[in-house]
Image (cartoon, helix red, strand yellow):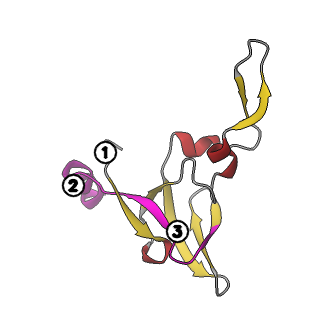
């Protein structure tokens, strides 16, 4: 993907095929959002919580497969590699493809 243009949309606005950036999102990637264990390594640097972090979210966009209103307060977003529940009205970053990406998608 050659773009890093985003728009904020509510989870209810997401549609199948949308690409979303969930890196460090407090609901989808809570340990990435927190980032650190509170411990330090041998050199005194903060120790990252790699065990709880969704490392795939650091380098890939999630492709939306479906959304579902699970409860009165929660919408679940099902993606290509992670499913997460979000409060209604919560906003995520949806990728805005540049014109070159759109042409590639239309040709596929």
- Closer to the chain start, of discs 2 and 1, is 1
Residue labelled with disc 3: 65
Mark on residue 103? 2
Tell me if mark 3 has few (under 14), some (14-19) or many (20+) residues whose alpha carbon lies within 10 angstroms of its own. Answer: some
- Which residue does the image show at 47% across and 62% down from the upper left? 92
Position in image of residue 48 (x %, y %): 70, 32
User: Can the viewer see residue 74?
Assistant: yes
Q: Is residue 89 magenta?
A: yes
**CB of mark 3 within 8 Å of CB of mark 1?**
no
- Which residue does the image show at 53% across and 53% down from the upper left? 22
**Left or right: 4, with 21 as reference point:** left
- Which residue does the image show at 50% across and 45% down from the upper left? 60
For the residues labelled 2 and 1, the Cα–Cα distance comes to 13 Å
Say above or below: 30 vs 41: below
Q: What's the magenta region?
A: 85-108
User: Can the viewer see residue 49?
Assistant: no
Task: Give whichever of 106, 85 is nearer the camera.
Answer: 85
Task: Give whichever of 103, 11 is nearer the camera.
Answer: 11
Residue labelled with disc 1: 3
């Amino acid at each position: 993907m050659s773009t890093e243009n985003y728009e904020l949309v509510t989870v209810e606005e997401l549609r199948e095929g949308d690409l979303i950036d969930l890196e460090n999102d407090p609901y989808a990637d809570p340990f990435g959002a927190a980032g650190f264990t509170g411990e330090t390594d041998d050199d005194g640097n903060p120790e990252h919580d790699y065990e709880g972090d969704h490392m795939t979210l650091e380098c890939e966009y999630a492709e939306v497969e479906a959304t579902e209103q699970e409860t009165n307060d929660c919408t679940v977003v099902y993606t290509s590699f992670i499913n997460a529940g979000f409060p209604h009205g919560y906003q995520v970053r949806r990728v805005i493809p540049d014109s070159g990406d759109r042409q590639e998608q239309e040709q596929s």
